[in-house]
Image: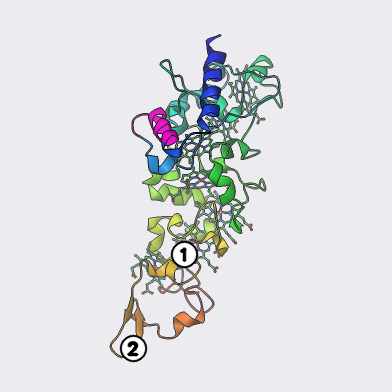
């Protein structure tokens, strides 16, 4: 009966944890994640809360999943969430059931229907530890995750490798993830906007934003982070070697008649249609 004990320990831990100061949580989560992989700056928003519940089921541990889900179990050792551990000297991995809920009924029934949580159908399982994400997906412009049209798993692989798309470093593969559904914006274009090399998330918040189209800024600031505005002696304003006096009052940089082809153009090097 080692497993249920472990889980009870974990549950005690997380319940105790809720009343504590954030720095302590931070410290603990940092220690849990091990290898110094997670910094405190990150996990201030993440809390280890209770895993999902399934009526009548108990926790059986990740080993019990191996016999039937061999591939996922094998790859899981490379996954970010694999490193989450319950506290204590014999700390074991929280593992599969932290997202899928207790598996005893599922295992006993040989994988019977409705015996386990599948987060593809609902993001609730992710929200319970990533509390701040629920708010992001409720912002005026957001990916329809709560609406069930896409899932966290479409962009985050929970079972294998870095859970951050592209590992936060390989931006090409982050763009490819967005490009699975947004082929038109990915290109290739004859005149590609080089900003895309920095990744789609330089301009878009992947979860949600107060600005339309998930944009990180709603006006020229979006563009002026990389393109400089120069005021000449005679008062004219230049951007990219071209006189923009008066143009910035017309609206955004990407409204009709301006750089509408903001991702890239096949006809015009200045990103116009
Ligand atoms: C005795 C075999 C067996 C064991 C052990 C087992 N499963 Fe399954 N599981 C299945 C079968 C069969 C299915 C349904 C077919 C499929 O999707 O592969 C399934 C489906 C699932 C699904 C998808 C369910 C859905 O509604 O879409 C999840 C999630 C899952 N298993 C997780 C787990 C976890 C976590 C464990 C360990 C606690 C586990 N399984 C242990 C056989 C098993
Ligand atoms: C960080 C949360 C998390 C952990 C931990 C986790 N899973 Fe999953 N699992 C998911 C998500 C999310 C999905 C749905 C993927 C999607 O949206 O396509 C899923 C789907 C599944 C499925 C359904 C088959 C499929 O591909 O849709 C199985 C089976 C499964 N997981 C087994 C496991 C096993 C076994 C482990 C442990 C070795 C595990 N999971 C650990 C989040 C998790
Ligand atoms: C049992 C709690 C728990 C559950 C459930 C959980 N996570 Fe996590 N997750 C964590 C912790 C703790 C970390 C590491 C601390 C951190 O970086 O915020 C983390 C890290 C992450 C990160 C990387 C954060 C970063 O800044 O590097 C992503 C992305 C993520 N989780 C997505 C998900 C998704 C998607 C799901 C649902 C399929 C999920 N998580 C379910 C606890 C959980
Ligand atoms: C449309 C794709 C997409 C979806 C859907 C998505 N994410 Fe993300 N998420 C990303 C990308 C891309 C990043 C990396 C952001 C960056 O590098 O600026 C990220 C970063 C994160 C992070 C770490 C940084 C942060 O913002 O805290 C967490 C945690 C996270 N996602 C959780 C979730 C959860 C939970 C869900 C589902 C409720 C989800 N994500 C759905 C694309 C997505
Ligand atoms: C699994 C498919 C899928 C993936 C992957 C995906 N998206 Fe989306 N995206 C959608 C859906 C569905 C909508 C909502 C479309 C609608 O409401 O008409 C959307 C909407 C958007 C919008 C707003 C469009 C509008 O008209 O307001 C932007 C911007 C966007 N996605 C950018 C991204 C970025 C950046 C990524 C990668 C981090 C990404 N998407 C990954 C499916 C996806
Ligand atoms: C330089 C900033 C920037 C980058 C980088 C960027 N976008 Fe956009 N994106 C925008 C702007 C601005 C709009 C709004 C265009 C409009 O309203 O006409 C937009 C709109 C969108 C839309 C809504 C449909 C449309 O075309 O109006 C989608 C989907 C989208 N972007 C996806 C992506 C994807 C996927 C990537 C990465 C391959 C990406 N974006 C990179 C600035 C950017
Ligand atoms: C992440 C940095 C970055 C951001 C943000 C960015 N750009 Fe760019 N943009 C570049 C780079 C790099 C080039 C290629 C070098 C050059 O021509 O300055 C470029 C080229 C261009 C060009 C073609 C150059 C020309 O001579 O006409 C236009 C037009 C342009 N950007 C418009 C925009 C607009 C509009 C926005 C805001 C929606 C924007 N950029 C945001 C980095 C960026």
Report x, y in % for residue 107: 64, 17
- Mark seen at residue 177: none
Front-most of residues 29 and 247? 29
Report x, y in % for residue 272: 47, 74
Query: What is the magenta segment's predominant secondary structure?
Result: helix
223 vs 231, left or right, is right
Q: Is residue 75 above or below residue 68?
A: below
Name the residue at 71% across, 27% down: 114
Reply yes or no: does residue 244 show up in magenta.
no
Residue linked to disc 1: 263
Element assignment for label 2: loop
The stretch of residues the image draws in magenta is: 24-36
Q: Is residue 128 above or below residue 148?
A: above
Residue linked to disc 2: 235
Name the residue at 38% across, 56% down: 198
The scheme the figure's colours follow is: rainbow
Of the residues tagged 2 and 1, which is closer to the observer? 2
Query: Is the CB–ligand 6 distance for label 1 below 8 Å?
Result: yes
Element assignment for label 1: loop
Identity of the residue furthest to the bottom in this view: 234
């Amino acid at each position: 009966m080692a497993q249920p004990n472990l889980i009870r320990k974990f549950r005690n831990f997380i319940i105790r944890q809720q009343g504590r100061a954030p720095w302590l949580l931070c410290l603990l989560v940092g220690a849990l994640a091990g290898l110094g992989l997670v910094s405190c700056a990150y996990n201030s928003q993440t809390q280890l809360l209770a895993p999902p519940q399934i009526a009548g089921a108990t926790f059986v541990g990740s080993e019990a999943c191996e016999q039937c889900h061999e591939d996922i179990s094998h790859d899981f050792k490379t996954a970010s969430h694999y490193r989450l551990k319950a506290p204590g000297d014999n700390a074991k991995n929280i593992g599969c059931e932290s997202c899928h809920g207790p598996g005893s009924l599922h295992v006993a029934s040989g994988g019977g229907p409705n015996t386990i949580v599948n987060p593809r159908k609902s993001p609730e399982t992710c929200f319970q530890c990533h509390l701040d994400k629920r708010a992001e997906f409720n912002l005026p412009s957001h990916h329809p995750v709560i609406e069930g049209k896409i899932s966290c798993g479409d962009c985050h692989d929970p079972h294998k490798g870095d859970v951050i798309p592209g590992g936060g470093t390989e931006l090409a593969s982050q763009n490819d993830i967005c490009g699975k559904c947004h082929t038109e914006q990915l290109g290739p274009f004859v005149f590609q906007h080089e900003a895309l090399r920095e990744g789609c998330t330089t301009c878009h918040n992947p979860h949600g934003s107060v600005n339309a189209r998930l944009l990180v800024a709603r006006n020229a600031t979006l563009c002026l982070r990389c393109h400089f505005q120069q005021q000449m002696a005679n008062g004219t304003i230049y951007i990219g070697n071209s006189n923009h006096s008066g143009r910035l009052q017309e609206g955004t940089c990407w409204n009709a008649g301006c750089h509408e082809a903001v991702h890239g153009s096949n006809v015009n090097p200045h990103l116009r249609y």
